[in-house]
Image (tube, grey):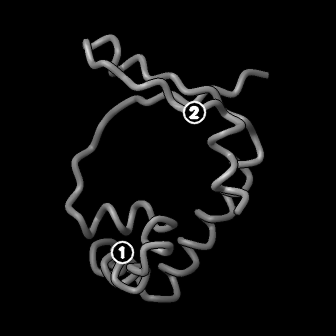
Amino acid sequence: MSHVQSLRRLVCLCTDCHAATHFGFALVSGRDAEALAHLCWVAGMTEAQAREHVDAAFELWAQRSAVAWALDLGILTDAGVTVTPPPSPDERSRPAQS
């Protein structure tokens, strides 16, 4: 089975929405409380609902991180954007394992 992660679209986010969307990054950046509060506000969730949502997202991330994914960045290269070659799947998995 082929495991390919394809970039399909780009979405502009404000800083607070970016932190809520990339909660793991917010966590390692010390912004998790702000990100959780913003998620509650934007999505109309209670804190318990937001924590459940984040926990489910981390579970899915853990499952998906068990696979070495190839990257398809054709949406960028087909538009003439020069992309710096990404690290290999094995190199990308190292930070996830720490």
Q: Where is 37 relative to 83, above or below?
A: below
User: Does residue 16 appear left or right of residue 35 in this picture?
Assistant: left
Dot in front, 1 or 2: 2
Q: Secondary structure at mark 1?
A: helix
Of the 4 image quadrants, the one containing the N terminus is top right
In the rendered structure, find residue 39 and report the number of the disc placed on it.
1
Q: Looking at the picture, how far across and down is residue 97, in whole percent? A: 73, 58
Q: Looking at the picture, how far across and down is residue 36, in whole percent? A: 40, 80
User: Does residue 52 appear left or right of residue 7 in this picture?
Assistant: right
- Identity of the amino acid at label 2? Pro
Q: Quadrant of residue 53?
A: bottom right
User: Does residue 1 appear left or right of residue 10 in this picture?
Assistant: right
Residue at 44%, 23% in the rendered image: 73
Q: Quadrant of residue 84?
A: top left
Q: Which residue is mark 2?
A: 87
Q: CA distance from mark 1 to mark 2?
A: 31 Å
**Relative to the observer, which residue lies in front, 80 or 40?**
80
- Identity of the amino acid at label 1? Leu
Q: Looking at the picture, how far across and down is residue 72, in whole percent? A: 51, 22
Q: Earlier in the sequence, mark 1 or mark 2?
A: 1
**Relative to the observer, which residue lies in front, 28 or 56?**
28
Q: Quadrant of residue 31?
A: bottom left
Residue at 38%, 68% in the rendered image: 20
Q: Secondary structure at mark 2?
A: loop
In the rendered structure, find residue 60 and report the number of the disc placed on it.
none
Residue at 31%, 18% in the rendered image: 82
